[in-house]
Amino acid sequence: MSTTTATGSASFLSGKPLRFIAAGILLVNGMFPALWILFTSLKTEAELTAKPITWIPHAPTVQNYVQAFSDQPLHIFLFNSFMVALLSTALTLFVAVLAAYALARLNLTYRGLILSLIIAVSTFPLVTLLVPLFEIMRALNLLNSWTALILPYTVLSLPVCTLMLVSFFEGIPRDLENAAMIDGCTRMGALFKVVVPLCAPGVFTAGILAFVNAWDEFLLALSFNSNPSLRTLPVGIQLYQGEFAFPWPVISAALVAGIVPVAILIVIFQERVVSGLTAGGIKG
């Protein structure tokens, strides 16, 4: 009887029921906050504060979205966030590709030390870097500009993106590059015409991570830009609250407006991102 029980327990732990339970927990954990914000954005203030709590709005309204764009220049916040995230992602990928290729292909004497330093740098809390970065930006006269955010975001995303791309580049046979160089390509040409296209899933995954990190960042955006026309979305959303008032439906509408672009981006590149994460996990 004990053997049968043990076998049944092992079968449960390694079988489909446990997988479905784990998947359900992850789904609820990931989807519930987003759904709650969406439902809140469609409620009136009265319905939101009514008791008992209503999970799904009885009379959905888009007035909160209209108010979100009328109370604050939400379109400007979205535009600033998009441009800063896009430009920092492009710069991050360019530098990360070069750095990862050097670490994967060149016989560097201190390669292990360099990788260790990259990992160590990626663990620094952002708050410890705030004052040094602020002083650097002020010395370079870059405060109150997109550049004041693009450069730090690039530096902050580089360690993770570089480490991710190293594992992908190491999986590409050197013979492909050698064949391209025999046909007339330079090393840089072989990198961008042969290696990078073959590592497209990894590049897309690194790009998504860099874009989301820049899109969500709040502390540097608040500290480096005091110009209202340059505020990014995370900084702009805090302006909806007053000293004693928290219009949660309007704030939720602004949050939904900020979630949608990232969600669309992930949906478009979903297959590449999933294959990139899977391949990176196998190679790592």
Image (cartoon, helix red, strand yellow):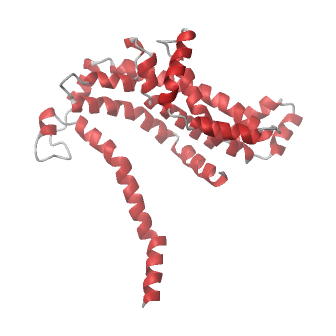
Residue 47 position in % (x across, y down): 13, 38
Residue 27 position (above or below residue 233)? below
Query: Quick check: 180 left or right of 71?
Result: right
> Depth check: 167 or 59 in front?
167
- Residue at horizontal 41 percent and vertical 69 percent from the top: 17
Q: Quadrant of residue 93?
A: top right
Residue 132 percent coordinates (x, y): 54, 21
What residue is rendered at 54% in x and 33% in y? Answer: 210
Q: Residue at x 83, y 37 (%)?
A: 180
Q: Toward which corner of the image does residue 111 lie, by quadrant? A: top right
Q: Is residue 194 left or right of residue 281?
A: right
- Residue 52, percent from left and from top: 11, 47
Residue furthest bottom in the image = 1
The answer to whether one can see residue 217 in this image is: yes
Asked if residue 62 shows in the view, the reply is no
**Could you say which is closer to the camera, residue 63 or residue 157?**
157
